[in-house]
Image (spheres, grey):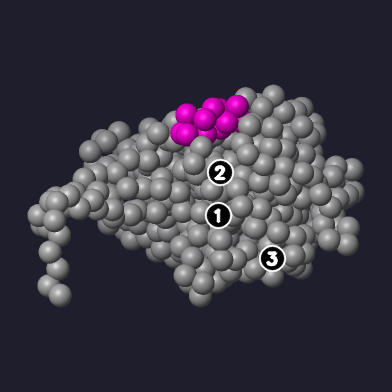
């Protein structure tokens, strides 16, 4: 059984009263991790320590902050096997997915390291005689970050890397479903050379999570909040942040469409669909939920897509040959199966898959999906691809935008100019032409529109999110006032 303590002031500590909670291995159904369950007092203490350290870390020269983050990337990669063990046990993900998490998380840390010298400003002409005016960016204070379980190393690294690069201190709340994985990241960061208390990690039991989150958002030293997770919880975070006038960066749910135009490379589109819809059991915010296929090529596409999906089975992630692992919980698998059954009972054709055994759900293709079905509207967060056929581009765009979500999308077509025109009409923060909906690069502005959230992680957009923009003037010469 793995352990996950709180990390406060660079010391692993137990929660008040030695309170703990257990995370179950979704496959073995045995306890995977016993984690410390923070009280409000513990969480407040973590924020106080971060506030105490802010003055030291924000005054640390950028090259030193860069060195710390690069060192953290090296340490993270050196601990890959520990992350693999924790991710398989806690989330049911495959070994390959865990290794990829470590590799991309290290890149996120390195990209943030490169941004430490990019907190630039500008001079602005002033109408006052003898006045010199400038706009500068500087660290804002303590950042409260919340990371989810589905890509636990990637998204936890993203939640802390840019805030730290900008000179902020951070309190990271780990997911109740991956506490050991998030603790490992805290351990790595505690050894990278930052002042003690720069990053603090707290865990909470599922029952106490809302109370802990509200207490940290309300803490007077917390100046920014970032959250990656469901739209339902994101709304609560946003409402709480608004009450306390705390800006929030929210990356929430998705219902990514992939539009396959009549001139698309069908084989390339099928490759992207298999990856986009089924990778990591469809438990990625950018997963391809809807495949909109021109009716002139739809049957050809579906036949090839079926052949690929039929060859994949969900299995134990500890099996070296496993391609598709477990859903995060049996309840999640039951919900996905319910969406499949509802669609079939309402007229969809089950092209492939549909099997559920415990936490395992096979890749599933549903053809003829329409707006009368739950799967048309709800984010499945499972390995389901919904096929919707369209007659022309205007209909395709209308269907693509017929959702409350707007995170990722893609368009396939050999005429790139035409595909670009379609992409520009899609209401999403991210769109890829002739590529899968799942794609991430640390330097890119990552985020969504509509119910997929607001704000952007990554690159210079991340600097904007985690700094204060200040107007500073210097008066040279005599200043005259009216009274």
Q: Earlier in the sequence, mark 2 or mark 3?
A: 2
**Membership of 67 in magenta stretch:** yes
Residue 263 picture quarter: top left
**Residue span colored magenta:** 61-73
Q: Name the residue at 57% across, 31% down.
A: 68
Q: Secondary structure at mark 2?
A: helix
Relative vertical location of residue 358 with respect to residue 184 in this rendering, above or below? below
Where does label 2 land, which residue?
56
Q: Name the residue at 71% across, 47% down.
A: 9
398 and 330: which is toward the camera: 330
Q: Can residue 450 be seen in the rendering of this structure?
A: yes
Where does label 3 land, which residue?
212
Mark 3 or mark 1: which is in front?
A: 1
Residue 70 picture quarter: top right
Marks 1/2: CA–CA distance: 12 Å
Side of 402 where 311 appears, left or right? right
Where does label 1 land, which residue?
142
Marks 2/3: CA–CA distance: 26 Å
Proximity of marks 3 and 1: CB atoms separated by less than 8 Å: no
Relative vertical location of residue 388 with respect to residue 459 in this rendering, above or below? below
């Amino acid at each position: 059984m793995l352990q996950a303590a709180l990390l406060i002031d660079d010391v692993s500590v137990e929660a008040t009263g030695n309170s703990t909670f257990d995370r179950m291995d979704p496959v073995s159904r045995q306890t995977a991790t016993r984690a410390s369950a923070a009280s409000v007092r513990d969480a407040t203490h973590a924020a106080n320590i971060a506030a105490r350290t802010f003055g030291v870390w924000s005054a640390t020269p950028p090259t030193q902050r860069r060195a710390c983050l690069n060192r953290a990337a090296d340490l993270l990669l050196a601990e890959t096997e520990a992350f693999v063990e924790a991710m398989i046990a806690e989330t049911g993900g495959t070994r390959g997915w865990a290794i990829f998490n470590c590799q991309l998380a290290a890149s996120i840390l390195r990209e943030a390291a490169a941004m430490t010298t990019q907190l630039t400003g500008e001079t602005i002409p002033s109408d006052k005689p003898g006045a010199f005016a400038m706009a500068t960016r500087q660290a804002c204070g303590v950042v409260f970050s919340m990371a989810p379980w589905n890509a636990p190393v990637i998204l936890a690294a993203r939640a802390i890397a840019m805030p730290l690069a900008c000179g902020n201190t951070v309190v990271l709340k780990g997911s109740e479903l991956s506490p050991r994985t998030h603790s490992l990241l805290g351990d790595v960061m505690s050894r990278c050379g930052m002042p003690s208390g720069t990053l603090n990690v707290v865990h909470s039991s599922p029952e106490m999570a809302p109370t802990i989150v509200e207490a940290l958002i309300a803490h007077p030293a917390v100046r920014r909040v970032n959250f990656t997770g469901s739209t339902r919880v994101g709304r609560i975070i946003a409402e709480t942040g608004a009450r306390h006038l705390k800006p929030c960066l929210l990356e929430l749910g998705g219902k990514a469409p992939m539009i396959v135009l009549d001139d698309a490379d069908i084989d390339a589109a099928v490759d992207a669909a298999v990856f986009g819809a089924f990778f990591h059991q469809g438990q990625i915010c950018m997963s391809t939920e809807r495949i909109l296929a021109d009716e002139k090529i739809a049957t050809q596409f579906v036949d090839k897509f079926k052949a690929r999906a039929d060859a994949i089975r969900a299995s134990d992630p500890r099996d070296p040959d496993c391609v598709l692992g477990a859903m995060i919980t049996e309840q999640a698998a039951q919900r996905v199966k319910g969406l499949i059954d509802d669609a079939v009972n309402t007229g969809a054709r089950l092209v492939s898959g549909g099997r559920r055994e415990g936490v395992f759900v096979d890749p599933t293709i549903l053809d003829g999906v329409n707006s009368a079905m739950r799967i048309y509207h709800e984010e499945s967060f499972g390995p389901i691809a919904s096929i919707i056929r369209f007659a022309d581009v205007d209909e395709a765009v209308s269907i693509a935008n017929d959702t409350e979500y707007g995170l990722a999308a893609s368009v396939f077509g050999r005429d790139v100019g035409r595909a670009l025109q379609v992409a520009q009409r899609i209401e999403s923060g991210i769109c890829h032409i002739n590529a899968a909906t799942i794609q991430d690069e640390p330097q890119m502005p990552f985020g969504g529109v509509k119910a997929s959230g607001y704000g952007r992680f990554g690159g210079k957009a991340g600097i904007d999110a985690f700094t204060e923009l200040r107007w500073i003037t210097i008066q040279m010469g005599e200043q005259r006032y009216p009274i």
